[in-house]
Image: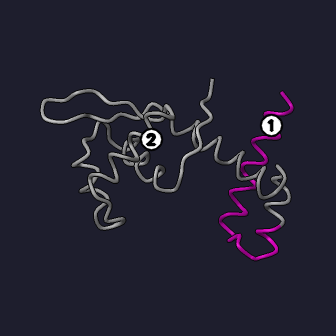
Amino acid sequence: MAQKINLSDGEWKLMNLLWEDAPRTIAQLVFALRDDTGWTKGTIFMMLSRMKDKGAVRFEAGVRSKLFYPVLQKEDATSYETESFLSKVYDGSVGLMLASMAGQKALKKEDIDELYAILREAEKEAKK
């Protein structure tokens, strides 16, 4: 069953690093985020503790420091975030979202081509 865990923007940054390469220590996370965020070891530790309580990460004792692993799967997180966003902003309607993007001219030709391909594939699947 997919986990429904809401992540803050900062937690997404940490999760993306863990999904990319786990396990990681706090020192490795601080180093990876230093230019982007400037977060301290204490800030990252506090965030990881909160994320552990949510069930998004776990840790094991390493030789010199704790090793952090993702528990939450990236596919589950992106699926939940997409559903939440659509529900919150567009009352659950993909059509309204696309109409808004098209109206703002936010879709490039490549985006439109990709959407057509996705819709054609979805149509094939729906006919099965």
Question: Which class describes the residues within 10 Å of circle 2: few (<14), some (14-19), or many (20+)?
Answer: some
Task: Reply yes or no: does residue 112 show up in magenta.
Answer: yes
- For image coordinates 43% across by 53% down, the residue present is 13
Q: Residue furthest left?
A: 64
The residue that disc 1 covers is 124
Picture coordinates of residue 94 (x, y %)? 81, 53
Indicate the amino acid at tag 2.
Arg
- For image coordinates 32% across by 59% down, the residue present is 33
The residue that disc 2 covers is 50
Picture coordinates of residue 125 (x, y %)? 79, 33
Q: Secondary structure at mark 1?
A: helix
Q: In the rendered view, does 106 fall on the left or right side of 16?
A: right
- For image coordinates 72% across by 45% down, the residue present is 83
Task: Reply yes or no: does residue 110 show up in magenta.
Answer: yes
- For image coordinates 32% across by 36% down, the residue present is 68
In the rendered view, would you say 99 is above or below 2? below
First of labels 2, 1 by sequence position:
2
The answer to which quarter of the image holds residue 70 is top left
Quadrant the N terminus occupies: top right
Give the magenta range. 100-128
Quadrant the C terminus occupies: top right
Picture coordinates of residue 60 (x, y %)? 28, 27
Task: Looking at the picture, tell me which residue is in the foreground, 95 or 108.
Answer: 95
The answer to which quarter of the image holds residue 30 is bottom left
Picture coordinates of residue 67 (x, y %)? 26, 34
Indicate the amino acid at tag 1.
Lys
Disc assigned to residue 70: none
Task: Looking at the picture, tell me which residue is in the foreground, 73 or 118.
Answer: 73
Q: Are discs 2 and 1 less than 8 Å apart at CB?
A: no
